[in-house]
Amino acid sequence: MDRIILGDNQFFGINHMSEEKGRSLAIRFKDTEAIIRVIDTAYACGVRAFMLNTHDRVEKICDHFRASPGKYADLRLYPSMPYAHKYANAVHEKGLVGTLNAFVFSGRSVRQVANTVIRGGMSVINKDMIEVMKLLVDAEMRMFRGLNVPAIFLQNIVTDLLLGFGAREAFIEFTKHVKKIYGADPAFNTMNMPALVDFLLASGIENPIVCSSINKTGFLMTPSQHEYERALAQKPFRPMAMSILASGAISPGEAVEYVCHLPNVESIVFGASSKEHIVQTVEMICSHWNIEAGVPELAEAS
Amino acid sequence: MLRGGVVGFGRMGLTHFSILNTHPSVDLVAVCDSSGFVLKTAAQHMGVKAFKSFDKMLGTMGLDFVIVATPTAIHADVAECAITNNAHVFVEKPLTLDPEQSRHLLELVRGKNLVHQVGYTMRFHDIFMKVKSLLDSGAIGQIVAFTVEMNGPVVLHDARRGWRSKKTEGGGCLYDFASHGVDLVNYFVGSPDEVIGTVLNHIYSDGVEDAISSTFVYRNGARGNLLANWSDPSYRKPSCRFEALGRRGKIIADFYTYKVFFQEDPEVAGYTEGWNEGYLADIAEPVRFYVRGFQFTRQLDYFIDCILEQRACETCSFEDGLCTDIIMHRIRTDGDIRRSHDGQNYIRRQPVLRH
């Protein structure tokens, strides 16, 4: 798994420190070209891995990658699905069943729809929720077609809802589906890492990739920072850290130092929108972990 | 273990189920919904008994408590059934669509030793809890003026489907969306003495309003404004902002940040004269399980604690629910005065409040 991954919250106006800051980011990244410029900057700094949620605009970013296969030959994408607000708003307008049908069938050719109909039935209403989930995964994965996807993440609201339900089969079937259809590792974003890891291991999902907030102040670490540190030290799983800055509550230096010296953390997902921050973060992580960024541009960029 | 059931398995019902299903003192055993698909999924994957009829569920399952997360129009029926069956009851906001119904529920529940709570979840949000404690400390002095703003991208197209587009079902921006803001007015400042100048706008919806502006007047001279719009596509997700000017300072707060201004050095630890600022990441208290926000777990754990400790809820009780319902009823009534026959709004001069 990639050790350094650039996240995408900043591109979509998501900021957990201030609504105004979120708005400024949304303005700054209004054009997809602005997003691609930051991705290219990260690429030049040696970052090859990007976590992208399934926001409608990600399709355009993926079109750009597909249009330059040579330039992005060793690009690795980590989709996180679904983009929750897309569904929440649609459910309000179309109802649950209308939404499921809309997402499963929208933007598909007659042949693709026919194939879906054979597998899922004309209306998803008659099918089991597990089948519906697989159809939705397929619908969300369409935007990443033809690109290198090492792991597919279930977004945290869905992961945590399912964890609360104790929906063991949903996790097992998601795991099987992404392995079988996409040859990808199943992965999970969560705000309840210790509980999720226990649940996945008890469900027979071995060595799972689990991405969670891991930061020095314990922000969004449920039920406690202590339980997180214990799980990291003791449980057999592949931990990925996000929200390392705790929405700006911690300075980058302190944040990176804390996470890099925890046991077993395999990857860090970080958000940055300027060259300076990307270079600074990548250098700090590489230095603490004693790894090479991988490409000569790092020295040049810095 | 407390045996519980959830009536209404939509977005909030699912959230409540997920949170309570992980509570060490709770055993969720039953779910009721009108959709066969939803019931089939719940029975198959969540290990609960599924019901189409809440009467039957409450009459046969011997539940200690019920979560009511149906469309608002049937809150009263389900809650009454729960109370009749001696179940503690948590009702999603708003309590009902009619203050008389809410009053009736309150009288019923008072006759029994049952815990009752309404899902005004913002009262359990870290930032708004901080605002409440600052206001109660008197640090900014008596409130002179305040604004509650709620905006979000909830309805962005012509919408005629679903219960949220029907006034009789409890749809519309006021009851379904702005009720949180109205409850914050009730919680932070109290019930206004007069509601004036209400305008209910239609943007996309036919049968319900998509935006509201209303003015609250208080006998002590305070004035407040509610501005709500659920059809604003510039927001990524629903937002709520509260601003209050007191005689000694000011508070501005939203879901992530609070700012407090003090005219003089306040006698509150951690604050100084001038602007002070705090963030959610600095003050958020962990919960035992997290889904969609700290506040959702905190409000349900409070409800369960009240049941286990055999005490009444001190916040978000049916009394609070009734009070907020009354304010919303007054907003609706005031807004309807300004609605002409063709559905357009107009402004008409109202009598001035006499002191």
Image: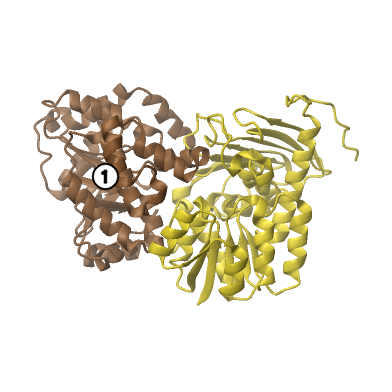
Q: How many marks?
A: 1
**Residue that mark 1 sits on:** A269
- Sort mark 1 into few (<14), some (14-19) or many (20+) by Cα contacts within 10 Å: many
How far across and down, in percent of the image, does residue A175 sit? 24, 54
Write down the quadrant of residue A172 in the picture.
bottom left
Q: Colour of chain B?
A: yellow
In this image, A299 relative to A20: left or right?
left
Chain A display color: brown
The answer to whether residue B71 is above or below residue A29 is below
Mark 1 belongs to chain? A
* Left or right relative to A236: residue B176: right
Amino acid type at image mark 1: Val
Q: Quadrant of the C terminus of chain A?
A: top left
Task: Please provide percent x and percent y for residue B289.
Answer: 42, 61
Q: How is the image coloured?
A: by chain
Which residue is at 12% across, 34% downward? Answer: A74
Q: Is residue B217 left or right of residue A5?
A: right
